[in-house]
Amino acid sequence: MTCVTLPDTHIDAMLTILEFPDPRLRTRAQPVAVFDKALHELVDAMLATMYAAPGIGLAATQVNVHKQVLVLDVSEEKNAPLALINPRIVAREGEQVYQEGCLSVPGIFADVQRADRIVVEAADRNGQPLHIEADGLLAVCIQHEMDHLVGKLFVDYLSPLKREMVRKKLEKARRETA
Ligand code: NI
């Protein structure tokens, strides 16, 4: 695993997080080909946005950037930022059920079944290869964020009826804060 430097939290760095059912969340992300300053700035802004939310993971799709970039930090101390570029799951084993939430589906939590252990190949922000063997919450988080990169949300695992209830609840919440 590679750690990236924690960015200074600055209001300019905050990105707007798209919320379900925004159709842009359904976009499939493209692989990153160039590991340049713009990519580093995106990663830093995504980390700042994730920590400020606060959340434990954020995919570029959620900030309307359709590149295969995700950031996460599942540590208690929030001092282990991780950026995965072009991630691929190369092995998966077992099952676990975890009550998930998502910054794009605020205030909603639901049980989702995923692989218990995964092996992920990715690149770090400099294009260097990363090999990650993950289990528990880290495995959940990586699978959840990778779903975003193919336009999938955790509410897609719920029944259509439950998903419609989620949509209405969010609509009501947005009306009340408007
Ligand atoms: Ni999410």
Image (cartoon, rainbow, N blue to C red):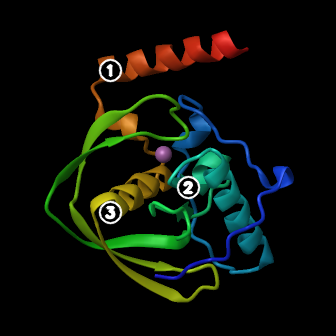
Q: Quadrant of the C terminus?
A: top right
Establish if 174 lies above or below 24. above
> In the image, 30: left or right of 116?
right
Element type at mark 3: helix
Q: Which residue sits at x=60%, y=85%?
A: 127
Give me the C-alpha separation between circle 2 and circle 1.
24 Å
Label 3 environment density (alpha carbons within 10 Å; few <14, some 14–19, many ≥20): many
* The furthest residue to the bottom: 128
Look at discs 1 and 3 and give the one toward the viewer.
3
Q: Position of residue 103 (x, y in %)?
A: 54, 40
Q: Nearer the viewer, residue 123 or 101?
A: 101
Kindly state the secondary structure of the residue where label 1 is placed: helix
N-term-proximal mark, 2 vs 1: 2
Residue extending farthest to the right is 12
Callout 1 touching callout 3 (CB < 8 Å): no
Q: Is residue 134 above or below residue 141?
A: below
Q: Earlier in the sequence, mark 2 or mark 3?
A: 2
Label 1 packing within 10 angstroms: few (<14), some (14-19), many (20+): some
Q: Which residue is mark 2?
A: 59
The reply to whether dot 2 and dot 1 touch (C-beta < 8 Å) is no
**Residue 92 drawn at (x, y percent):** 22, 68
Query: Pointer 1: what residue?
Result: 162
Which residue carries the number 3 mark? 139
> Label 2 CB, ligand 1: below 8 Å?
yes
- Alpha-carbon distance for marks 2 and 3? 15 Å
Q: Residues within 10 Å of mark 2 (few under 14, many from 20)?
A: many
